[in-house]
Every structure is written in structure tokens, then in C-alpha cells.
Image: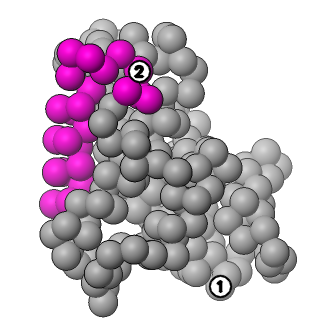
Amino acid sequence: MKVYFDASRPDHQEALRALWAATYPDRELHGLISDQWKEMGWQGKDPSTDFRGAGFISLENLLFFAKTFSTSFQRLLRKQGGKRAAWEYPFAVAGVNITFMLMQMLDLEATKPRTFVRSVFLQMLSDNEWAFDLLYCVAFVVMDKQWLERNATYMEFNDVLKSTRAQLERELLMDDVLQIEEMPSYSLLS
């Protein structure tokens, strides 16, 4: 979480290239700074400027989602399914915001657990090192589902993110949910 994206680091550059390859396997990337990135939902031609507070982990989350649940990832990227708004959320930037929302929801920067949701999640994380990445994927599909149910527009993104957080918190605190895969919304992934 405390690793900021650094465009001068070869491993960070490689992670960006890997995200492109996982997202568009049949298309060559013309450079780490290219208008092509806008197609993925970055704000400009240099995605490194969009990581801000969420840092490198947000890139890792996007890459995990692209590789692990490629069908869901591609469906959300391409805005397939449901009645879509004229002003959709930018996919990649939404992903960065979801990472940041999860970091806040789980209070991951605190030295001691201050919320029950965090305590529950830390137990899940101790059982599965991929719990944060899996929760990220669930959060993304929940956010998109709520987006569609509300017929939301770009200006409502923060409201949708807040309701996504509330739903994730409810599901994490269910008595019969002991791992991310047991969350009701996990079934939205494919």
C-alpha cells in the first residue's frame, strides 16, 4: 500500500505493459505514454498520473482482475450488459478508486484494528494471501451492478462507490462468510 507508482522503475513499467497485454492481447502497445491508454479508461495518455493515493497496488489489482476473471474484466471494460449511460465511468480510473475505497473501508493504514470489518478481513487475509485482490474483483462487479441498477451517470460515481462500500461491509459481516469466495456477490464474477 505504501508503494507509490514510479514510472522510472522497470518493474512498474513491466506491470503496466502486462496490464496492457492482459487487456488487449492482440494489440501492440505503442509506448508507456500513448493515447491508447485512454481506451482503457485512463484520464490521459500517461496512466502513471492516475495512481495518486492508491499507489502501485491499484495497478496490481487491475492486473489480477484481468488475469483471474478475464471474462468479467472484459465485460466491464467494454461496458457490456445492461442499459449503459451516455456518460460512463472511466474503467481504469474507477479501478484505482475502488482500491482506494477498499483501503479506507478496511482501515489498512491503522496499526491496530479500529473496525470490526477490518478484523474480519484480516482473518480472511491470514487464510488467503489473495483476499484483498479477490475482494477488489468483487467490489468492481458490485459497483458496476449498482451502476446499472441506478442507471447512474458519471456525476453519481461517488454515490455508487459509497453504496458499493456499504454492500461489501454488510456481506463481510455475514455470519456464514468466512472467506471472500463465500460473499453472495462473489457469484457475479466469471
Residue 137 x %, y %: 46, 46
Q: Which mark is residue 182?
A: none
Q: Which numbered disc, 1 or 2, marks the residue that appears first in the sequence? A: 1
Q: CA distance from mark 1 to mark 2?
A: 39 Å
Magenta segment range?
A: 159-182
Quadrant housing residue 107: top left
The residue depicted at 23 percent of the width and 60 percent of the height is: 146
Q: Is residue 69 left or right of residue 102?
A: right
Quadrant housing residue 108: top left
Q: Is residue 186 above or below residue 151?
A: above
Residue 97 x %, y %: 38, 54
Can residue 104 be seen from the camera position used here?
no
Q: Which mark is residue 179?
A: 2
Circle 2 Cα neighbour tier, 10 Å, few/some/many (<14 / 14–19 / ≥20): some
Q: Is residue 149 above or below residue 188?
A: below
Q: Say which element carries label 1.
A: helix
Residue 98 x %, y %: 38, 50
The residue depicted at 40 percent of the width and 43 percent of the height is: 187
Q: Which mark is residue 35?
A: 1
Q: Is residue 68 above or below residue 24?
A: above
Which secondary structure type mostly characterizes the magenta part of the structure? helix
Q: Say which element carries label 2.
A: loop
